Amino acid sequence: MSVYDMEGQKFSRRLLLLGGLQGGLFLVLGGRLQFLQVARSDVYETLAEANRVNISQISAIRGRITDRTGKLLADNDRNLQIRMVPERVGNMDVTLRDLARLLKLSPSELHEIRRKIRRGPSFKPVVVLEDLSWDEFARLNLNMPYLSGIEPLVGQKRVYPHAQSVAHLVGFVGTKTREDLQRVEDIVGDYVGRSGVERDFERDLRGTPGVRHVEVNAIGRTVRELQSEAGKKGRDLALSIDLELQNFTTTRIKGQSGSALVMDIHNGELISMVSAPSFDLNKLSRGIDVEEWEQLIDHERKPLVNKAMQGLYAPGSTFKMLVALAALEDKLIDPEEKITCTGVYKFAREEFHCWTADGHGPVNMIDALERSCDTYFYDLALRVGIDRIEAMARRFGFGKVTGIDLDGEKGGTVPGRDWKRANYDTGWRSGETIITAIGQGYLLATPLQLAVMTAALANGGKLVQPRITKSDETTEPAAELGLKPENMAVVQRGMYRSVNRPDGTAYASSLLIDGARMSGKTGTVQVRRISKDERLNGVIPNSKLDWHLRDHSLFVGYVPHNKPRYAVSVVIEHGGGGAQVAAPIARDIMVRLLQKKPIARAPKLASHDRSEAGS
């Protein structure tokens, strides 16, 4: 075989091999095409559609909050916004630069936008700007073809028509945080309840989000909206408060630091609950700068604290009714027995002073409640003992939260032998029992607890659970305390005389409206120690002391005296004497309430003070 023949055979074999490889490759490609276009056509059709259609969630309209008569406390208004999906933005720096140019944004505003973007996952939409003017919104829409990942949005914003009056109750909404995402799952939108009812009823108020389908082009820009499904609006929530009384109370205690609340003694509904000073809900919900926020945080009078349920105070003489009941229930004293008050009570090597240096003379239990005689209760304390006092205080709900349908409530302190040993590693002293009997020392309670106590004294011994939402068939029945009616009557009579007899500490705050009077008890709580020298030379009056050294002013009471329906509790921080400050405030609130039409039909009932002019 010639050389040429051998070379020809080699060339033919190479062609055959190459042709076989090409044919095999075409078979593989054909098989793959058949698999993709036929066998897996439904899967890739879905993926292609996803590339063409973007699906996003739409925040539902937030439920409104009203007072008991339907007056709006929290509503929604139009909010022109810019929303961004970070992962769809081509170049973040360029996009933000264009936004800044179009809307004249400051460096601090751009910094805030970047902070919002970093806070969440890149695939979730973020509201980067809101409360735009119509001109700004229109300018943005005209430039939308040049802004990737950006879309204009007509959203909702929260508005509070009575921001100052209901600040601590209603609360406000704010930008969501990582903590919020852990607390409440599937938050759609950038806002969530930050405090009060807005926070505690977040799930009810936010509703169910809707869904929006939009067609996008190859680079992700919106072409048109294909479909939009509106979300389910959040549930409207009716609170138990009466807005008119709430506004009046807010005005009445303006300039003070403290709280005032009114509660239905039968079902626990709070008709009014005000904490002062207050703050502007609308400002906080829209965002305030760091300087303003620090001013609120550091303010001496703590405007952000709901003092009605978070403020802890010694109850002072408003606690004397429970000491009296502890003695009466165990028959440790006859209510008619008289104890002589000289102005000073000596025990062991200590002297305990009555609020009036001259004393009250011989007084029985009703006299002692009427005139708020400390000496009577000093003596009674040693007969009763700290164990019975502690037990009665806990019976009336002191030392634990009341169970109100708002978070953040404090439980206070009820001291006793075990408590002292656990907290101070030492035993209880009789002198501490004496001080506890006039509501001072280690004893601490919230104004809300004082209202619950007063309600139980007024309704015949039932401990009601307070609530800020309107009561319904699910309202828990009041707990019976099992107190003897004749003993309750003694205490009620003392409270009546305290307000309605000339010798009563609150007589200057008595009222008479359509035959209805108020029963109650004043309280004045020292926040500083008075030395022996000061007692000899004259106690400095509150009006001449710095604000933080003045006594706390307290009053608790109920109306009407003959058919009790509403309890009132007023605590004014560093206000001075209970008779001079807290009692007149309570009177004015009760006058306003009694002059109104009945708020609701009442159910049938089953059968240490110290100030210049008394407390």
Image (cartoon, rainbow, N blue to C red):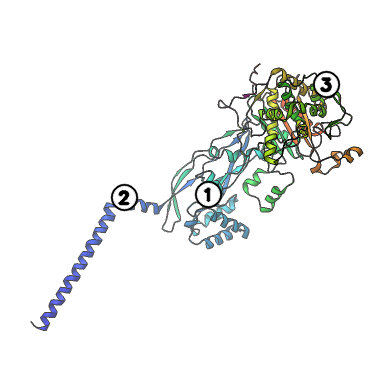
At 49% from the left and 51% from the top, the residue drawn is 124
- Identify the element where label 3 is drawn: loop
User: Circle 2 is placed at which residue position?
Assistant: 42
Task: Examine the image and state in which quarter residue 564 appears.
Answer: top right
Query: Which of marks 3 and 1 precedes in the sequence?
Result: 1
Whether residue 481 appears in magenta in the rendering, the answer is yes
Q: Quadrant of the N terminus?
A: bottom left
* Amino acid beneath label 2: Asp
- Identify the element where label 1 is drawn: strand
User: Circle 3 is placed at which residue position?
Assistant: 338
Which percent across, then down, holds residue 195?
Answer: 62, 42
Q: Are marks 1 and 3 in contact (CB under 8 Å)?
A: no
Q: Nearer the viewer, mark 2 or mark 1?
A: 2
Q: Nearer the viewer, mark 3 or mark 2?
A: 3
Q: How many marks?
A: 3
Which percent across, then down, holds residue 595?
Answer: 73, 25
* Amino acid beneath label 1: Leu
Query: Which of marks 1 and 2 precedes in the sequence?
Result: 2
* Within-10-Å neighbours for mark 3: few <14, some 14–19, many 20+: some
**Left or right, residue 117 beside residue 289:** left
Which percent across, then down, holds residue 153?
Answer: 53, 49
Residue closest to the far right: 537
At 12% from the left and 80% from the top, the residue drawn is 6
Whether residue 15 appears in magenta in the rendering, the answer is no
Q: Which mark is residue 40?
A: none
Residue closest to the far bottom: 3
At 16% from the left and 76% from the top, the residue drawn is 11
Which percent across, then down, holds residue 237?
Answer: 58, 34
Q: Which mark is residue 153?
A: 1
The region drawn magenta spans 470-483
